[in-house]
Image (cartoon, rainbow, N blue to C red):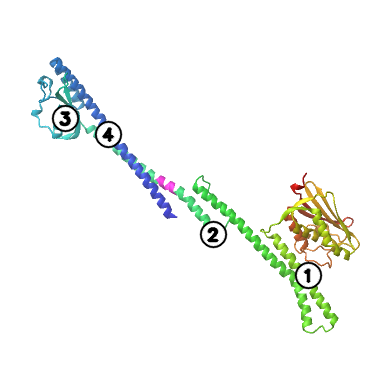
Amino acid sequence: MKKIFWRVFVYFSVVLIVFTVMTGLMFTRFNRTNIVGAYKQQLGDLASAVAQRTSRASQNDEADAFQDYMSALEDFGNQQDIDVWVLSNPDSSSPLSEDYTSMDVRMVTLPEETKRILDSAYNGKKKNYSDYDDIYQKKMLHIALPIRNDAGEVIGAVVTSGPMEMQENTIVQYEKYMLICIAMGLLMAVLLAFYFSRQLVRPIIRIKESALVMAAGQYDYKTGISRRDELGSLAESMDILSEKLVQAEAYREDIEQNRRDFFSNVSHELRTPISVVKGYADAMVEGYVQDEGKQKEYLKRIQHECAGMEHLVSDLLILSRMQNPDYELNLEVLNVIAVMQDAMRSIRILMKQKNLTGNVTYDDECSLIDGDYDRIRQLFIILLQNAVKYSYEGTRIDVHVARRDGKIVTSVKDIGSVIPEGEWENIFEKFYRASNHGEKEGSGLGLVVANNIVERHRGTIFVESGEQSGTCFFVEFPETSENLT
């Protein structure tokens, strides 16, 4: 990850440094151009004013006045350290007379560049140049422009010369300050590059750490990044992944726990009947039981224990499927009354064995819910089987279906063994048997399966029991919207 940081840091630094240097060079060039340009403008304006004054004086024959003007101009030039030459054009048909000139170039050896701009002025063009001048022994700026008469003929030229020392010093000072500014800019560029690189790379490092932590099994780890950009979106995706992994882990643990519970329950509940079956079988195999009647009794006992184990395994499998998060109900619109009547018909034979009577009563024949027919029927059979098992002989089982406050309420009531009030909630736990269970057969899973079926249908189940009122199981389901008129 450090490679990414340094790579981004170098990219940022190069961009900011190049921008800083280019900006500094541009402003330096711009300042130099402005300083030299302003000086050129000053000397050019002076040369133009002298050319006009000379042209007017020569046309009006004002030699005396012009000499006074030149004397004043010379004083001004001395103060400003500027030289002004008024020269006659020897190639003109009417060149300036000596009364209006200030210098004879034939008496001076001019540099080649000065001759060049002077020739250009004689040809009617304004020219300038700046360079080290042997005459002045310093860098000078020279500007030459033509002097014309009324006819437009070039009769002479004006050359203004000024030293560039002050301008050069100003430029040097400016460049020094600009160099300092560029150095500070470079330092700021490096610091900014470091800061922005860190800001950009730090979330990536945090996301990488989150990925490693989650890969190690700590799925609830969050990035803690809140940004409104692509990195923020990536961090948010990692947080969503964390939540999904937590859910998946919880789901896996539920399945694993169900598997462990299933095998634990099977091993716990099958240990006793298997021991009994093995004992009877060993006794018969070893020849300890010779009596034919006794052998039949042992075989019946083995058959009975096998039937009990089969019923137990069946209940455990049903409970395991019901507790699986992937288990899906085949929901449809059901009439609870019809399902209860079907369940009642299935246990009529059991009821006759104990001389029990009972019917299904209801308040409204249209008592509809959204449910799985097989599971709801199984629920009612479990409740009715328990009612038959614990009812006194010759009593009655009352089943009633009612509509109440948007719910379908079903009650199964019997007259028999009473469940102590302190155990009303415990009877829905695995393998729990009420204290008055006595020698009644059962796996202790029936009500657990019933409770799971009710919960899967978003309902509730509870019990009330007393000596006078008997034992009554209540089941409440939310009625379907199709039940509303």
Amino acid of disc 2: Ala
Q: Which mark is residue 308?
A: 1
Distance, label 3 to label 4, CA atoms, is 23 Å
SS at mark 4 in the image = helix
Q: Is residue 16 above or below residue 111?
A: below
Mark 3 and 1 residues: CB-CB less than 8 Å, in contact? Answer: no
Mark with earlier residue (2, 3): 3
Mark 4 and 2 residues: CB-CB less than 8 Å, in contact? Answer: no
Q: Position of residue 229 (x, y in %)?
A: 50, 45
Specify whether residue 47 is painted magenta.
no
Q: Position of residue 411 (x, y in %)?
A: 83, 54
Distance, label 1 to label 4, CA atoms, is 109 Å
Residue at figure coordinates x 36%, y 47% from the top left = 14
Q: Which mark is residue 120?
A: 3
SS at mark 3 in the image = helix
Q: Nearer the viewer, residue 11 or 372?
A: 372
Mark with earlier residue (3, 4): 4
| Dot 1 alpha-carbon crowd within 10 angstroms: few under 14, some 14 to 19, many 20 or more | some
Residue at figure coordinates x 57%, y 60% from the top left = 217
Mark with earlier residue (4, 2): 4
Q: Which residues are magenta?
A: 191-197
Mark with earlier residue (1, 4): 4
Can residue 80 be seen here? The reply is yes
Residue on which disc 2 sits = 215
Q: Which mark is residue 33?
A: 4
